[in-house]
Structures are given as structure tokens and as C-alpha cells.
Image (tube, coloured by chain):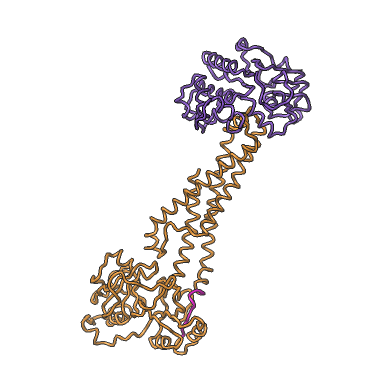
């Protein structure tokens, strides 16, 4: 009995925990950035691909636009980001060393290296903690990038291997699952490519790429930090009205809120479903206790004979139900903690959600208390039934 | 009989004192029990014979204070049952009366000893009396008292910690007898406690129960339909004789 309540509590709290953790992760990954800039699209889409590496960019932005933004007097720092390639399922991020210097997340933390340092040479790569851990990479290892986001085998930049020069500490952000290279490197590996495929008969060996113009021409997005947050709307207007090409600047917080309002419907349906599962568990409890009462009429009569009044009988049965609910709820809580402990690596790897195992949010505690309170209320039903039985039976149960 | 310390004024000569009692179960065809007169003196051991449907359960409910008759004289241990509130009657029942039932007399999820001590949980008076009976101030005086009672009823002390369900029917009835006797209630009401036992066990159990009641000077109302048992009691009454 307690088990079915435990399972339903696991479901309820699990959904709640996933929900809050996902939100927290999303908002943490961008908390240090004032504006995200990309080609004109929907704000949510821009956030998804530029920050969370979900989906693909539809358009790119010109290098000249980046320069115009970066040199704006209100801008403290600007990080260019060029996406599109991948390495064994992990996104490749073309950027500049500014990324490691200025990127801020959570409560103003910056990226830190667990080994090595930022990239210096063209074919240097800095990998996130998950990339290093899952692929077993160390400093000095050589890696080959894939063209495009999907690992389809053939379209590899096999002629231009990269060397791992830095490994970042774990952040719990998409950064952990990214391979960072210089913007010049992105240009270099695509020198002999056109329209998503190697140009037949043309192959430029890695030694010679430096002879070419490797200045970046296109970007996917720009992350901007302002000198003062007060000027954020002014800056946003400046970018949105930029004459060179259609651009979009979004405030990450606003875009995230918009995202949650879309995702919220799904979240709430999930919560409602799990609440229903809890309701089923609790009504199962009531049904079982009620069904058992018939066989316990003698027990009730014995209790009456030793001085228990009908109200005591009522309380005994209600408390019995409450104990089952409390035990079930606590079992569920323990189960959830154990489960999130074991599921955390999986969720991190496949959904990018980092679960802080054992940390139950205030909302989850409230839900748990709500379950227990409801459990007590429904336990009043068998309590009342026992009260009626003991009044009717007295000392001689009718069997 | 030592009635001192009970804090009740006016010593009555009867443990049970009924006059003009009428009880009607609700409903148009509800069972009706009327008893013009029924008096039991202290220390009596009454054999009350009655077929099923003759009103035994109703009489037990009235004596135990679970049922309330129409206004009449219904005094148990010189207490007017009709004047007590229902919770006062619950309290009175556990303070002064021990009950013994047919079978399945024990609470299944409690141990043998816990079953015996059940009345002490609800009645400070019986708790106090069983502590006095233990004659020691040890922390487990209550348990000792229960174990001694079990031993007097021929049950091994090793059984005390067993779950109640592990016992045979005969053993269970002895545990129930110990529960009825603990804390020295003045009156014991037994409702066919031997009907589930075979005749050898029946005689054995009856001897033990009567012996305990005699030793402790407890008044006993023993309800049964088996008239062969009547010879062991000081008085035998047929319920039909009582009814008016």
C-alpha cells in the first residue's frame, strides 16, 4: 500500500524536480549575458540555438555587423559564436578567446580550466567537461570535426585534425557539451568546402591554410555584456534597427519567460497527470483500508471493550491511514533521491539537464506536505466508517 | 470484598442492580429486551444461559455501557449507568469491567503481552492496580505483572513477546482471560469464551478462570448456551427467566 503511494510520489516530485531544474539550468546558462544577437528570427528560436545548441540557425550574420556592435560605446564585451559543425555528437563552437574571459553564468561565475588553457593556434580546441569525460580525451589528443550537426560519418574534416589544448571545468551548462575552436579554424576547415560538401579535386592541406584569408566572414550569434544594464533597451533598439542587415537582439530573461509560457502548458499537464496518479494511489489506500474494516470488526469490538470510545477508534483508523501515507511519501522521497542520483548522468548526457541529486526544492516540499495533508483527509473516510461500525456493533461484532 | 478507595459514596450490596429495564433497538421491528429485575451480589459467579437471539448481546452491551436503556434503574458497581455520558461509560467500562469474547479475542498486530496490557493503556486505574500487584518499582513492573498473570493462567513467559496470532485458540483464550483480569476489575463478563474449545480445553480453561475469579474475589457473569457448564457456578440463570 505504502509502495503505490511511494511510486506516485516519485512521479509527482520527479516531474516537479525536472521542471524546476530545467528552468534553473536554462536561466543559469545565460544569467551573465545582457543581450543575445542573431539573424532576425523568433526570440525563442534564437535563444534555443544560440545558447542551448538546440536546433539550427536559419541565417547567419555578417562579420561587419559584429564589429559594429562590438565597437558600440555601451558594450563592455561581445562574444562571437559560429555554430554548425560537430564532433561525435557534441556541438563545435567557433569563437574567440573573449569567450573564456567574459562569459558569465549562474551567479557571475566565469569559465575555468581544469587543464590547459584557451586556444592559441588555428587548430587548437578547448573541450567541455562532458566531452572530455565521455570521449576520454586528454590534453594533446587529436580530434576530427564533422561537418554539420549530425554524425553522418562521411562528411568529415579529416584532413585538418585539431589538438586538445584546454579542458574546461564542469559548469552544468551546454558549455560542458561543446568543443570550442577559434573562428579562424572554422574558416580554415571550410576553405575547400562549398554548399556543404568538399569541392571535388580541391584539397588544401592544413600546412597551407595560413596563406589564405582566415578572417571570419559570417557568424551565428553574438553574446553581449553591457557596461551598464540601464542601457539595455537602448542597445536592443540599436541592434534591431541596424541598417546593415536585419538583426534581432533579445533579452535572455524575457525570451526565457516567453519560452516557459509555451512549455508551461506541457509542464502543467504533466503535473496534473502526476497529481491524478497520487489521487489514484490515495483512493486505493482508502479502498484497501475500507475493505479490511469488515474483517476487523472484532478488533474494533475488543478496543471498545477495553475502553476505547468511538472517537478513539475513529482516530486510530485515521492515524493508521496517515502513517501509511507518510511512510509512503517518505519512501517516495528517498526513492526519488536515489533515482535522481542514478539518472543524473543520463539526463545530463541526453537532455542537458543537470540534476542536483538530493536537493529538493521548496515547491517539492510543499507538494509533499500537500500529499500528506490530502492523505490525512482521505484517511478520515475509513476513520468515520470505523466510528460508525463501532457505534453499531458495540461489544458484539455482527459478522 | 474490598471496595475502599473507589471513591463512591453509599456502599451497595449489589454489583449489578437492574429494575424495570427496557431496551428497544431502533426500527419498527427492532428487538426489544425488558428485564424486570436482575441483581448480582459481589463474588457471585453467575452462569447465564441463553440461546442466540435471546438478547445476550443486548444485555452485555447494556452492562458494558455501550447501550443506553430507557430511563430505569441500571446500576453497575453502584454506579448509575443511565446518568453517565458515553465517554464516562467508556471509561467506567475499562476501569471496572473485564471482557472475554468467544474467539479472535486478541488484536492481531500486537504481541501477547501488549494484548494483556491493553486495558492499562486506556485506564490509569487498572494500570495503577497492576503496578501494585507487581509489588516492585522496576521499570518493567507492568510487564512483570502481565507475565505473572499469564503464568498463573498456564502460559509460558516465553510466549509474552510472540505475536498474538502465533498462538493456538486455547492459548489465545487464556491471553484474553489475562487481559480481562489485569488491573483487578471488580466484574468480568465472559461471552461464550469456551465455545471454540474442545471439551478437555473447555474444562481446563473454565477451572483456571473460576480459580482466578475466586482468588481475586471478582464477580463473574459467564454467558453460554452449554448448560453442562452450569454446575461450576454459584448460580445459574436462564435469560428467558429474566425477561419480562
Q: Position of residue B216 (x, y in %)?
A: 59, 18
* Closer to us: B230 or A141: B230
Say how many tags the image has: 0
The purple one among the chains is: B
The residue that appears at 64% across and 33% down in the rendered structure is A390
Per the rendering, the colour in which chain A appears is orange
**Residues rendered magenta in the picture:** A246-254
Q: Is residue A94 above or below residue A273?
A: below
Q: Position of residue A350 (x, y in %)?
A: 38, 63
Q: A23 left or right of A298?
A: left
Q: Where is residue B159 in the image (x, y as percent from the top left)?
A: 46, 26
Q: In this view, does A276 lie above or below B193?
A: below
Q: Is residue A182 shown to the viewer in this render?
A: yes
Quadrant where the C terminus of chain A lies?
top right
- When asked about the image quadrant of residue A49, the answer is bottom left
Give yes or no for residue A247 being in the magenta stretch: yes
Q: Where is residue A340 in the image (x, y as percent from the top left)?
A: 42, 56
- In the rendered image, the residue lying farthest to the top is B231
The residue that appears at 62% across and 37% down in the rendered structure is A312
* Closer to us: B16 or B2: B2
The residue that appears at 26% across and 71% down in the rendered structure is A143
- When asked about the image quadrant of residue A25, the answer is bottom left
* Closer to us: A1 or A77: A77
Q: A243 left or right of A159?
A: right
Q: Is residue A298 shown to the viewer in this render?
A: no
- In the rendered image, the residue lying farthest to the bottom is A243
Q: Is residue B93 above or below residue A356?
A: above
The residue that appears at 72% across and 21% down in the rendered structure is B11
Amino acid at each position: 500500500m505504502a509502495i503505490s503511494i511511494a511510486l506516485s510520489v516519485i512521479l509527482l516530485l520527479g516531474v516537479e524536480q525536472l521542471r524546476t531544474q530545467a528552468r534553473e539550468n536554462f536561466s543559469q546558462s545565460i544569467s551573465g549575458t545582457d543581450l543575445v544577437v542573431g539573424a532576425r528570427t523568433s526570440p525563442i528560436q534564437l535563444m534555443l540555438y544560440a545558447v542551448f545548441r538546440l536546433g539550427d540557425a536559419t541565417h547567419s550574420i555578417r562579420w561587419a555587423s559584429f564589429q559594429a556592435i562590438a565597437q558600440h560605446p555601451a558594450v563592455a564585451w561581445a562574444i562571437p559564436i559560429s555554430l554548425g559543425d560537430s564532433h561525435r555528437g557534441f556541438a563545435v563552437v567557433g569563437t574567440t578567446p573573449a569567450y573564456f574571459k567574459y562569459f558569465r553564468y549562474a551567479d557571475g561565475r566565469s569559465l575555468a580550466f581544469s587543464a590547459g588553457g584557451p586556444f592559441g593556434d588555428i587548430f587548437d580546441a578547448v573541450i567541455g567537461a562532458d566531452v572530455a569525460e565521455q570521449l576520454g580525451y586528454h590534453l594533446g589528443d587529436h580530434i576530427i570535426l564533422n561537418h554539420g550537426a549530425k554524425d553522418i560519418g562521411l562528411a568529415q574534416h579529416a584532413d585538418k585534425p585539431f589538438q586538445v589544448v584546454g579542458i574546461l571545468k564542469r559548469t552544468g551548462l551546454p558549455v560542458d557539451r561543446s568543443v570550442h575552436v577559434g573562428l579562424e579554424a572554422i574558416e580554415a576547415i571550410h576553405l575547400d568546402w562549398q554548399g556543404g560538401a568538399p569541392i571535388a579535386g580541391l584539397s588544401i592541406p592544413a600546412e597551407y591554410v595560413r596563406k589564405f584569408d582566415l578572417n571570419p566572414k559570417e557568424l551565428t550569434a553574438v553574446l553581449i555584456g553591457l557596461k551598464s544594464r540601464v542601457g539595455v533597451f537602448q542597445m536592443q533598439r540599436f541592434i534591431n534597427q541596424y541598417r546593415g542587415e536585419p538583426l534581432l537582439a533579445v533579452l535572455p530573461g524575457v525570451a526565457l519567460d516567453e519560452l516557459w509560457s509555451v512549455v508551461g502548458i506541457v509542464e502543467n499537464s504533466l503535473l496534473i497527470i502526476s497529481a491524478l496518479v497520487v489521487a489514484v494511489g490515495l483512493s486505493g489506500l482508502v479502498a484497501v483500508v475500507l475493505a479490511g474494516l469488515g474483517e476487523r470488526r472484532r478488533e474494533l469490538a475488543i478496543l471498545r471493550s477495553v475502553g476505547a470510545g468511538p472517537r478513539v477508534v475513529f482516530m486510530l483508523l485515521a492515524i493508521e491511514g496517515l502513517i501509511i501515507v507518510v511512510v509512503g511519501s517518505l519512501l517516495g522521497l528517498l526513492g526519488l533521491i536515489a533515482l535522481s542520483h542514478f539518472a543524473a548522468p543520463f539526463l545530463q548526457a541526453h537532455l542537458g539537464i543537470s540534476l542536483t541529486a538530493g536537493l529538493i526544492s521548496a515547491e517539492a516540499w510543499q507538494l509533499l506536505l500537500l500529499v500528506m495533508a490530502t492523505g490525512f483527509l482521505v484517511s478520515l473516510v475509513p476513520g468515520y466508517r470505523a466510528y460508525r461500525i463501532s457505534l453499531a456493533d458495540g461489544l458484539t461484532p455482527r459478522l | 470484598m474490598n471496595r475502599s478507595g473507589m471513591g463512591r459514596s453509599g456502599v451497595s450490596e449489589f454489583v449489578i442492580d437492574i429494575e424495570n429495564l427496557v431496551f428497544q433497538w431502533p426500527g419498527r421491528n427492532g428487538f426489544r429486551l425488558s428485564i424486570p429485575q436482575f441483581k448480582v451480589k459481589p463474588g457471585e459467579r453467575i452462569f447465564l444461559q441463553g440461546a442466540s437471539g435471546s438478547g445476550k448481546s443486548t444485555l452485555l452491551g447494556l452492562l458494558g455501557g455501550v447501550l443506553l436503556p430507557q430511563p430505569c434503574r441500571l446500576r453497575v458497581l453502584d454506579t448509575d449507568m443511565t446518568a453517565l455520558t458515553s465517554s464516562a461509560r467508556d471509561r467506567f467500562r475499562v476501569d471496572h469491567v473485564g471482557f472475554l469474547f468467544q474467539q479472535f479475542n486478541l488484536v492481531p498486530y500486537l504481541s501477547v503481552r501488549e494484548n494483556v496490557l491493553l486495558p492499562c493503556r486506556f485506564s490509569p486505574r487498572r494500570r495503577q492496580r497492576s503496578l501494585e500487584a507487581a509489588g516492585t518499582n522496576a521499570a518493567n513492573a507492568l510487564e512483570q505483572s502481565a507475565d505473572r498473570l499469564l503464568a498463573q493462567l498456564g502460559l509460558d513467559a516465553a510466549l509474552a513477546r510472540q505475536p498474538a496470532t502465533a498462538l493456538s485458540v486455547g492459548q489465545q483464550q487464556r491471553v484474553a482471560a489475562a487481559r480481562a483480569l489485569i488491573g483487578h476489575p471488580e466484574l468480568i463478563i465472559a461471552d461464550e469464551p469456551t465455545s471454540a474449545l474442545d471439551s478437555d480445553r473447555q474444562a481446563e480453561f473454565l477451572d483456571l478462570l473460576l480459580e482466578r475469579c475466586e482468588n481475586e474475589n471478582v464477580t463473574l457473569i459467564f454467558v453460554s448456551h452449554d448448560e453442562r457448564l452450569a454446575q461450576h457456578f454459584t448460580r445459574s440463570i436462564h435469560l428467558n427467566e429474566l425477561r419480562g
